[in-house]
Image (tube, helix red, strand yellow):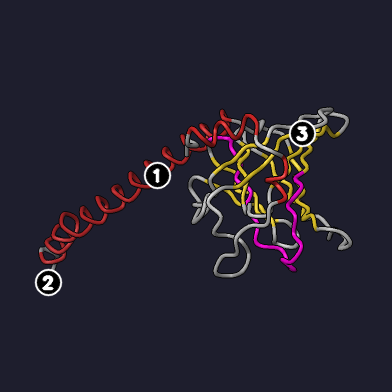
């Protein structure tokens, strides 16, 4: 959804301390009731990035026809790869929640001979999802999310998930093949019904008449 105008202004010059603000606790004490997710995107080689806000994608569920879900080995991080090429990352509240300062999201993708880094993202403690608007097709991505705590608590191990986005042409081919396969199945069912009708209503009376006219 589009951000309100005042949030767009915040995106241009908001203080970085907003990332470290403690979220208001929700019903589960995780801060999930925060209406906005503050984040900063830092390009490779950039020292800092602009602070922006986005609305959380609450209630999103990955539907089989339009989405494919990939989970990290621990199951805490889920990458929902959508048919339009975007990727929605989702994660639950980390434990413990006390002292949580935010999250660090690191991204990389496989090249022909080496692995290349993507833009890094810093997210506030209230964030539970993040949208990658565009992902390259036929490229294997690796995304790692690591909670950040206030000292002296050490950072726990990062949760990583790997996935590959199908190219747009391949997605179109799959959709076309699915449609053709469905049409073929309908035609086969119609042919089977027609054969059954002919056998039951045309051939059976003829066979019965031939048997009745036979020698006695």
Q: Point out the tag, 2 or 1, that comes first from the N-terminus.
A: 1
Compute the Cα span from label 2 to label 3.
90 Å
Q: Quadrant of residue 72?
A: bottom right
Percent x, y of residue 120: 76, 38
Front in this rendered view, residue 114 or 59: 59
Q: Which residue is mark 2?
A: 216
Is residue 75 positioned above or below 48 on the image?
below
Local secondary structure at mark 1: helix
Front in this rendered view, residue 200 or 28: 28
Q: Judge left or right: residue 97 versus residue 197.
A: right
Compute the Cα span from label 3 to label 1.
40 Å
Q: Point out the tag, 3 or 1, that comes first from the N-terminus.
A: 3
Local secondary structure at mark 3: loop
Please give the name of the residue rendered at 59% of the width and 37% of the height, measured from the top-left corner.
Answer: 86
Q: Is residue 93 magenta?
A: yes
Mark 2 vs 3: CB contact within 8 A:
no
Dot 1 crowding, Cα within 10 Å, few <14, some 14–19, many 20+ = few
Please give the name of the residue rendered at 52% of the width and 32% of the height, measured from the top-left corner.
Answer: 173
Q: Quadrant of the C terminus?
A: bottom left
Q: Judge left or right: residue 6 versus residue 40.
A: left
Is residue 48 positioned above or below 93 on the image?
above
Percent x, y of residue 129: 61, 50
Q: Which residue is mark 3?
A: 118
Is residue 78 positioned above or below 8 on the image?
below
Camera-side mark, 3 or 1: 3
Dot 2 crowding, Cα within 10 Å, few <14, some 14–19, many 20+ = few
Percent x, y of residue 147: 77, 55
Q: Which residue is mark 1?
A: 182
């Amino acid at each position: 959804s589009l951000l309100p105008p005042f949030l767009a202004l915040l995106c241009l010059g908001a203080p970085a301390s907003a990332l470290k603000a403690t979220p208001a606790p929700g019903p589960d004490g995780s801060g999930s009731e925060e209406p906005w997710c503050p984040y900063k995107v830092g390009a490779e080689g950039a020292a800092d990035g602009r602070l922006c806000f986005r609305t959380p994608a609450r209630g999103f569920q990955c539907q089989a026809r339009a989405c494919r879900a990939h989970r990290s080995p621990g199951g805490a991080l889920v990458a929902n790869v959508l048919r339009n090429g975007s990727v929605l990352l989702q994660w639950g509240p980390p434990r413990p929640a006390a002292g949580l300062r935010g999250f660090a999201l690191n991204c990389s993708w496989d090249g022909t001979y080496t692995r290349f880094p993507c833009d890094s993202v810093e997210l506030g403690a209230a964030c539970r999802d993040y949208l990658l608007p565009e992902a390259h097709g036929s490229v294997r991505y690796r995304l790692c999310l690591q909670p950040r705590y206030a000292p002296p608590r050490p950072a726990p191990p990062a949760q990583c998930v790997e996935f590959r986005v199908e190219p747009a042409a391949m997605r179109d081919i799959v959709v076309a093949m699915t449609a053709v396969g469905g049409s073929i199945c309908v035609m086969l069912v119609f042919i089977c019904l027609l054969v059954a009708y002919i056998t039951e209503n045309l051939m059976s009376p003829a066979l019965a008449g031939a048997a009745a006219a036979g020698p006695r």
